Image: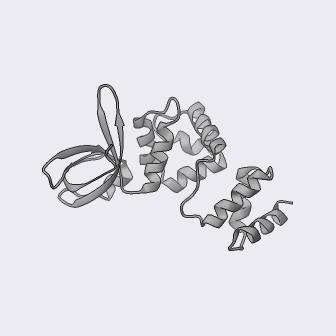
Amino acid sequence: MIKAIEGIITKKQPAFVIIKTASGVSYGVFISLFCSAKLETGTKIELNITQIIREDANLLYGFLDLGEQKIFEMLIKLSGIGASTAMAVCSSLSPNAFSSAILNGDADTLKQVPGIGIKTARRIIAELSDAKLIVDENVPNYANEALLALESLGFKRDRIVKVLADCKATNTSDLVKEALRKLA
């Protein structure tokens, strides 16, 4: 399994690059539009890779941002969501915008992605928010722990996220106490 590719970009299209490695092998890699905007032909780059092997193809999807790769990998695990739709999400929404849409149940944001209608948007929100797969890497660990603790007490995730944004505590126990006072 290929996990990363380092090499020089020899050809670039809006959502596809060809990378020539030091050994002389060139790989075709699908990328998001956000990733494409950061790349230049002739520069040396290392992309994190998600490899999808099918009966008729061996496809490589490259990412500079690990959050974007995480979203892509979560989406392709959902039934009815293929790699092209997952890459469309990565090209249309930043990892933070996607996480926010899932946490807040914002189907309208997901509907802006080409190929996603209202039913698919609602299903994505339901499957990912129920599985608690979205954890914002920009949020400190204690905030994620507090969110999970408050959820286990029966509070709704979207309400917790709004309350935690207003809290000032910097450790899990104080944050839970402060949030409980605001949730009560």
Q: How far from the left and from the top, in percent, is residue 179?
A: 78, 64
Could you say which quadrant of the image residue 55 lies in? top left
For this rendering, which residue is in front, 13 or 95?
95
Q: How far from the left and from the top, in percent, is residue 144?
A: 64, 60
As drawn, which residue projects farthest toward the top? 55
Relative to 4, residue 177 above or below: below
Q: Is there any visible trace of residue 184 in the rendered image?
A: yes
For this rendering, which residue is in front, 147 or 158?
147
Relative to 55, residue 35 above or below: below
In the rendered view, does 34 fall on the left or right side of 122? left
Q: How far from the left and from the top, in percent, is residue 141?
A: 61, 65
Relative to 124, residue 144 above or below: below
Could you say which quadrant of the image residue 175 lies in? bottom right
Way the structure is coloured? one colour
Relative to 18, residue 55 above or below: above
Residue at 60% across / 34% down in the picture?
A: 123
Total numbered labels = 0
In the rendered view, does 111 fall on the left or right side of 37? right
Image quarter hosting the C terminus? bottom right
As drawn, which residue projects farthest toward the front? 1
Residue at 56% across / 33% down in the picture?
A: 120
For this rendering, which residue is in front, 92 or 16?
16
Residue at 82% across / 60% down in the picture?
A: 183
Image quarter hosting the N terminus? top left
Q: How far from the left and from the top, in percent, is residue 97?
A: 54, 53
Q: Is there any visible trace of residue 161 in the rendered image?
A: no
As drawn, which residue projects farthest toward the left? 24
